[in-house]
Amino acid sequence: MAIDTSPPSTAAMFPILHDVLIDNTSLPAFMVSTARGFLPRADPLFSLPEEFKELESILAAMPVKTATGSPGLLATGVLGDTVDRSLPDLSSEIEKYKGNLPLINALYRDYSFLASAYLLEPCHLRFMKGENYGLGRQILPKNVAVPIAKVAALAGFKPFMEYAGSYALFNYKLENPSLGLQYQNLRLIRAFEHGLDPNSSEAGFVLVHVNMVSHSGELVEGAMAALEGCGKGDRQQFEKGLEGAVGAMTKINKVMDGTHFSHRLPRDTININDVNIKGMWTKSKPGDYTGFRTFIFGITSQSMFPDGVIYEGIPLCDNLLEIAMPATPLTDILKDFRAYRPGNHREFLEWVQRRASAIHLKEFALKEKSSAALYLHALNQVRDFRWRHWCFTREYILKKTSHPTATGGSPIVTWLPNQLQAVLDLMSAVHNMFKNQGGLGRSCSDIMDAALVQQDTLKKEVRKYCEERRVPLAR
């Protein structure tokens, strides 16, 4: 069955998959669908062909704690020597499988794990001794550099570890296939530290993300319905689609913190000692995060790689809701990060942005109170997600390390508040539009009361951490 994967015009609807075509290996592993959202079309491959047995052997022996419980190569600091000595250049073997894109994606995942571990192993060893990270290895050897460049190009990624294509969304398997994507049935395929133990914080960190994204199919379906309804001027369809998107975002946020209550906002200013928090906080403990965080640093804007690395031999809701980000260097970083996505995902998100703008979705939503209230609830879910992300950053990173940049190279204190403040500003603008018309109802008033408290809390926290770290406040 031939599938047109070229980006559509703004007027045409994006070719979302409803049948994920699980047996079609000629299609990319990642294609947006209503069934699986932003997860891969099929669960990731976790065993490589025989030709890659040396790669698989090193990856199995690599974690600080292997699947058998014994210390691995990273525990003793011998991964680099092992790769230099024992791994052949398998790039010629990749040619045999270049038509099987899910397998190419699995190879991309595996080579990106190996590349990150190889480059950052010296930093991990220093950090575990209580020292600064220092420098990573500055050269990625040909036996890793050439294959990762080849599989990245075939799979449509950049030749370094990415969140979707390797670290998280293509790095899980099902303990029992009949039980599906429920959290307790998920296991990691590759790990750096203790992640092959499903009860470890490393496993929890990744698998909570997988569990969250398992609800994204409903988000995609709701967003597409809202766009279609707005384009036709059908308010009933628009509101039904927006309700679906809000419902999906609510589920995602509940997975993030493990709560099972309504999405009213007063609970959102809680701290990690609140008894309602049972999600990421308990499955991946703040005190454990820095043990594996070293290996998920990028190579851009990082002190470990002041001159980059020499390769030897070689968010849907922002766009749908038209949330405008401030014109700052921090927003430029956000735009750069969005390039690090599967190609089909990136094209879909860009199309949503163009389509929402062309049909003036925000303007359409704000013409009627019922739609405006739903729009504010949708913004609230975006705020909810970003607030939790900030809370995780505060507890997992800011209180544990003084390193000035996040794993992707963004300023650790000011980058997330830049996005969160943009949402809070838009929420306030929407709320104020209807003040003289009796408001948008009690639930929207409750949302804004708590959002204003949260805005004040955010400003105080950002100021505190900027002063402690002697970094300027973002403008």
Image: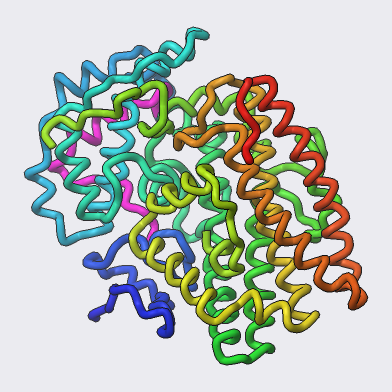
Q: In this rendering, would 474 be left or right of 193? A: right
Q: Residue extending furthest left?
A: 92
Q: What is the image's colouring? A: rainbow
- Quadrant of the rendered structure where residue 251 is? bottom right
Residue in the image at 58% along x and 20% along y: 402
**Along the line of sight, the residue nearer the viewer: 389 or 82:** 389
Say whether residue 44 is magenta: yes
User: Quadrant where the C terminus lies?
Assistant: top right
Work out whether residue 462 can be spotted. Answer: yes
Q: Residue 455 appears at what percent x and percent y?
A: 78, 46
Q: Residue 387 appears at what percent x and percent y?
A: 69, 46
Q: Residue 473 appears at what percent x and percent y?
A: 65, 33
Count of numbered labels shown in the rendering: 0
Q: In this rendering, would 249 be left or right of 313? A: right
User: Quadrant where the N terminus lies?
Assistant: bottom left
Q: Residue 408 appears at what percent x and percent y?
A: 45, 37
Q: Is residue 234 above or below residue 24?
A: below
Work out whether residue 41 can be spotted. Answer: no
**Along the line of sight, the residue nearer the viewer: 351 or 393:** 351
Q: Is residue 116 above or below residue 147?
A: above
Residue in the image at 44% along x and 16% along y: 133
Q: Is residue 209 above or below residue 234?
A: above
Residue stretch in magenta: 41-66
Residue in the image at 63% along x and 91% along y: 234
Say whether residue 4 is magenta: no
**Along the line of sight, the residue nearer the viewer: 249 or 40:** 249
Q: Is residue 59 above or below residue 29?
A: above
Residue in the image at 51% along x and 23% along y: 291
